[in-house]
Amino acid sequence: MAAHQKPTERDALAQALRAAVRGEVDFGPTARALTTMDASNYRRVPLGVVTPRDADDVAAALAVCRRYEAPVVPRGGGTSIAGQATGTGVVLDLTRHMRRIVELDAGSRTAVVQPGVVLDDLRAAAAPHGLTFGPDPATHSRCTLGGMIGNNSCGAHSVAWGTTADNVHGLTVARYGGDTLRVGRGRGPALPTEHPGTPALPTEHPGLPAGLPAFPTGLPGLPELIGANLALLRTGFPELPRRISGYALDALLPERGADLARAFCGSEGTLGVVTEATVRLVEAPAARALAVLGYADEAAAAEAAPGLLPYRPLTVEGMAADLVREPAGLPRGAAWLFVETGGATPAEARAHAERVLRAADALDGAVVTDPAGQRTLWRIRENAAGTATRMPDGTEAWPGWEDCAVPPARLGPYLRDFRALLAAHGLRGTPYGHFGDGCIHVRIDFDLLTAEGVARFRRFSEELADLVVAHGGSLSGEHGDGQARAELLPRMYGDELVALFSRFKDIWDPDGGMNPGVLARPARLDENLRFEVLPKRPVEVAFGYPHDGGDFSSAVRRCVGVAACRTAEPAGPGVMCPSFRATGEEAHSTRGRARLLHEMLAGEVITDGWRSTEVRDALDLCLSCKGCRSDCPVGVDMATYKAEFLHHHYRGRLRPAAHYAMGRLPTWLRLAAPFAGALNALARVRPTAALVKRLAGIAPERALPVLARETFTRWFRRHRGRGAVIPPGDRAVTLWPDTFTTHLSPEVGRAAVRVLEAAGRRPLLPGRGLCCGLTYVSTGQLGKARKVMRRTLDRMGDLLGDPLVVLEPSCAATLRTDMPELLPDDPRAAGLAGSVRTLAEYLEEYAPDWRPPRLNRPVAGQTHCHQHAVLGDAADRRLRERAGLTGELNGGCCGLAGNFGFERGHWEVSVACAEEQLLPSVRSAELGTEFLADGFSCRTQLEQLGGVRARHLAEVLAQGLDDEPPATGPPGPSGA
């Protein structure tokens, strides 16, 4: 039974699964669309998804699937790069329920885990005992132990702690059909505890020569397979630290302990489903240091790496300059080695790193001991799986040859030959990776959209496989073979050994139901490419998509599935993806939404195009925080994609009430301004407020904002009429009268005027009726947004191009990005975007000598998510430091996010987002803490949920100016 089966058969399978398992069974289009792809070039459409609650559910699901002849694909974090986490049958999602750490024994340094345990969760549980799990792929914040076992994952620390297979003691495995085996080394039980109903391991196997391994009785024929092929198994596998390709049958040799658990690692879901694993923990160094070594080129760095291994480093990672897109404080050179060292104390770790530095013979080098500095550098390396998907000129680059490995001593010559092969095929790539283990990651700018490009992809793959073998290497050094390389395994192992792989697969899975088409009897490497189903011509869109050639399909293709959005907490000060962290649902991650948009364009699973309710429902909980625009390694911009979708989805149709109420907020606030007092009074009457909220689509839990009795623009006209006293050297500056400042928080505007005047500037307001179009963009009313933006550009007149101070971060972000992307043919939009400054940016650039008041108090609060994603907050940090405001503002998202948190149906998610960082920071703040939030949404959320009044930085500075004693002596300089 496969994905093309008749609906009646599929329905019968789904019904049987629902009767057999306690977990969720979902054969709907959303669940299927979310699991068509992993992080590879491949796409296969499943029948449905089962999320088992426990091992019994796994066994029951496997029994049903065998009865219905439905293939099964076990799936963890879905970050596999070779296509092995995709399939045409039933996907077992092991991440939702089976994520329990069953036992952690610090004394024996072992842990018993379920397959859905995220690696970082295991490491966090082990950390209080001074332990960790050694293998650590770059996806450590979202990859699962089950997936790591399936792929035999490694990571940066493999030079010290080996691969996953090196750190697995025993496994409980459910086979196709539902029977369960416990596997480990060939003699004695694999696990310390007995599991009723699980076949035990015999101590001997009758009928075979003495000394041959004994295996579970549930695997008949395995002893004979090993016994008949001892010579081939002893000579057919290359000896190198990162040999991941194929099945590790040599682990079953008697002299290697007949370790069936080790042989199972790297089997890519083709043998069975791990339901429990006993893994080894290692001692984590109390302190670490990082030696960063610069070399002339990547080959020189590669040749230097083996010479550093005798110093017993924790890592020897390498990357070249073409992967570093921004200044990163790296030493001089065109390629670098990251060599991490450990020690019992910081001084010991540093001394270790300095020894490496002295021995390295590098062009330049540095030792970094500051944890924050180390994290910054490691983030460059860890994000490489995403950043490498785009060449410096924006050209797309793809996996497929992501992780070949050669003996470390051969890495330098291999890289030179690899570069030559790329050039011969007219291809480009950016190698990086685990130089100490001879393992290279690379994304290559294959053309996978045309028949000619796919043919070149095949030719290159065949020639590269031969090159890797010629250097004594493995086609896979970390992420497995999957569809990407399994077809080429005969070039590495020969036909005879590859035939043994198929026999090994058949012993475990005689019905062939476990992940068919992968590893054994594989599909062709140029089949099932995920790009084949996308439209051949650009679809009509409203945004310009300047970084994707104006093509919405290309924009959606940005998501390669590395799943940086699927983390339990944001990375550092990051934001992405608040809705996933609130719900834990793949559909509410940036990746999940991108997958649904991909399937919408494909039209096979999601069949209603722009009218799709599946895509609409997934995007409904997108906060449009723009966090993915900066935090996603490949720059997926889901806020823009959501606005685009809503524009098409509701074209010519009735919209939700909130779109009319909050989407057209600037119009309503202008009309309401003369009646602010009366309207505020009515809003305090509960029945009236409830009726207004119901009609406007506002969440009943929300309080309506208070309208300003005097708008900022009206106050400014009075203020200007009084004639402000400006110090000598004043210069005019345009201050943007955004809707929120004008009608809802005029005190922010008044404070900004006070600060600018104190800095020797003369604020001016541009013409009336200006609007950035934010609320129209966020609700997908893009035709109206364009009209508003064009009117704004017309009315700016001669002020276009002058510095423009924007106080509301969301409006600044709209002017800087959305306006030029919605009006790509109007050069005025790009000009206005380039003139936008935050208050801190303006003061730093145009009044560098101005001294802010010294406030000397701690701060807490929220950096607006749009500021983080689009504007940056470096200037704000420096200004706060100069003013004596100490402490960090929160990352993440406040959860209100403009109209999102006000809309009916979003209350719970909005509160969950605020509870992640913002509200805990309020509760833990010391007495006298100043709460800062430049965004109106953030201030509103803090007031309504936290009971505190946060202020814009301008307000705090203005109060400080008013509280300062009069200056004595001549005034200081006012700036250039």
Image: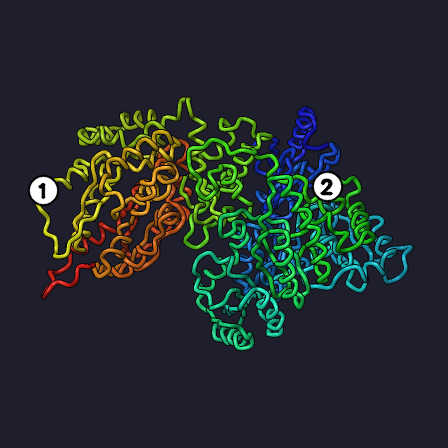
Q: Quadrant of the C terminus?
A: bottom left
Horizontally, residue 27 falls left or right of residue 574, namely right
Secondary structure, mark 2, is: loop
Please state the horizontal and vertical placement of residue 611, each as a whole percent of the image. Answer: 49, 26
| Amino acid found under the numbered disc labelled 2 | Pro
The answer to whether residue 155 is seen in the rendering is: yes
Q: How is the image coloured?
A: rainbow
Q: Considering depth in this image, is 598 or 688 the residue closer to the camera?
A: 598
Which of the numbered marks, if any, corresponds to residue 721? Answer: 1
Furthest toward the top, the residue is: 653
Query: Callout 2: few (<14), some (14-19), or many (20+) C-alpha neighbours within 10 Å?
Result: many
Image coordinates for residue 220, horizontal then vertical, percent? 84, 48
Distance from disc 2 to disc 1, alpha carbons, whole Å, reads 79 Å
- Give whichever of 741, 380 is nearer the camera: 380
Q: Which residue is mark 2?
A: 516
Q: List x then y, in percent, for residue 888.
A: 35, 56
Quarter that holds the N terminus: top right
| Residue 148 position (above or below residue 24) | below
Callout 1 crowding tier (Cα within 10 Å): few <14, some 14–19, many ≥20: few
Could you tell whether 324 is left or right of 440 in the image?
Answer: left
Of helix, strand and loop, which one carries label 1? helix
First reached walking from the N terminus: tag 2 or tag 1 = 2
In the foreground, 918 or 311: 311
> What residue sits 67% from the left and 28% below the top?
10
Give the residue type at disc 1. Gly
Q: Residue at x 55, y 63 (%)?
A: 129
Seen at 11% across and 40% down, the residue is: 718
Can you say whether 305 is above or below 558 in the image? below
